Image (cartoon, rainbow, N blue to C red):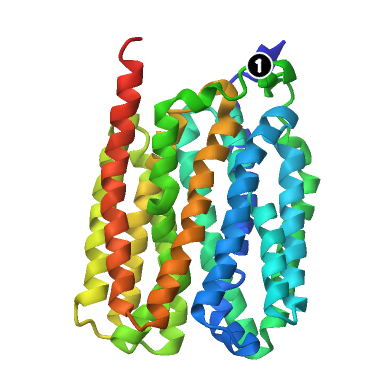
Amino acid sequence: MSSIAIPAPSLRKDASLIGLVGLAHSVSHFSQLLLAPLFPWLKDAFGVGYAELGFLLTIFFVVSCSVQAASGFWVDRYGPRPVLFAGIGLLGCAALGFAASTSYAMLAGFSVLAGVGNGVFHPVDYTLLNRKVSKARLGHAYSAHGISGSLGWALAPVVLVPLTMAYSWRVALVCASTIAFGVMALLWLRRDDLTLEAAAPAPQRVQEGSFDFLRIPAVWMCFAFFFFFYAGVLSVVQSFASESARQLHAVPAPWAAMCLSIYMVCAAGGMLLGGFLAVNPERCERVVGAAFAVAAVVALTIGFADLPGWAVPLAFGLLGVASGTAGPSRDLLVKRSAPDNATGRVYGVVYAGLDIGQAVVPLFVGTLMDHHQYRGVWVVMALLQAVLILSAFNVRRVRRTVLAPA
């Protein structure tokens, strides 16, 4: 009976599913940057420093981490569709809540709500892609998934900053909520494409040995890969990299505001390239290592070289290409470590590491910013990228050690 859902899907079905999942993923990443681009305005509006604003991101990602680990079990048991709709709905409500906030405490409360909504996406997305997309197109599916996330990040400052400058940050956040609810409406119209039906694991299978996957060393190495390392790089780029570069190189404010969007658009281009490189699973660790080596060199260049202001956005673009190229191979590292019947749980646990890193690093980097240690921001990024290179090869070593007896 279960074999009915297994025949290889057509290109059209694969493309449709990849598009829907990517659209949902872009909303998740867009919502992660609801506050960070607005920090200069929120700082004045609520009378707080960068460390306090960074703590809002800590709240968001700590909650998202907890929900992400749990949502993997929900996805494996109940299917991805209801979990996905709940997540998008909560993100839309959180954006409205931010817009209505009149105190820092309210911002913190709605950061909790946004974190709950954000926590469902990776288990949902990768369960749908791994089970419904043909294996021959899986590398390109990961590439498209990563591109959609980067475009969501890129879109956030492009939408929020001009609306804030033209009207107010509250208007910008209300508009952000309409984006979330609009995507939710579209997904509802195409909800039949998001079902797993017979491909979903049976409840008895979920209850029996639900935590067996935690005994796989490579799962924990992937968790470490995302914990504090990859996530730390992301949090630095998203939160304070543009401002620190502006302070170091006298970048005009409009150019500095575009640096994050340039990074994300170029990261999407890098992911397109990375999708072709990920076709060969045997070289995924080398791709990750080479890409982050380039990224570390660029980060140190921004931090210590005497760059003219116009060159900084270009450097952000190169940084984005390098980081994006690693994306599909990174996802393949996780896929190769996940048992087929525990996809949601593995991705939930591994990507919880992503949230933990993004929760912790803004506190430290925000403190550096408050003390005007702008070069230190780029040193932190380069060190994290160096550890990423070692982590990727360690995942490969641990997986081969486990698989050797077979």
Side of 209 where 198 appears, left or right: right
Say which element carries label 1.
loop
What's the residue at 74%, 39% (across, down)? Answer: 81
Side of 365 where 284 appears, left or right: left
Image quarter where the C terminus lies is top left
Q: Which amino acid does label 1 sit on?
A: Glu
Side of 210 where 229 appears, left or right: left
Give how far across and how far down residue 164 sits, in percent. Answer: 63, 84
Against 143, residue 367 (above or below) is below
The quadrant where residue 190 appears: top right
169, 312: nearer the viewer: 169
Give how far across and how far down residue 167 sits, in percent. Answer: 69, 89
What's the residue at 69%, 24% (across, down)? Answer: 200
Q: Name the residue under label 1.
A: 208
Image quarter where the N terminus lies is top right
What's the residue at 25%, 53% (across, down)? Answer: 386
Against 211, residue 234 (above or below) is below
Q: How many labels does the image show?
A: 1
The quadrant where residue 204 appears: top right
Q: Is residue 209 in view?
A: yes
Against 17, residue 184 (above or below) is below
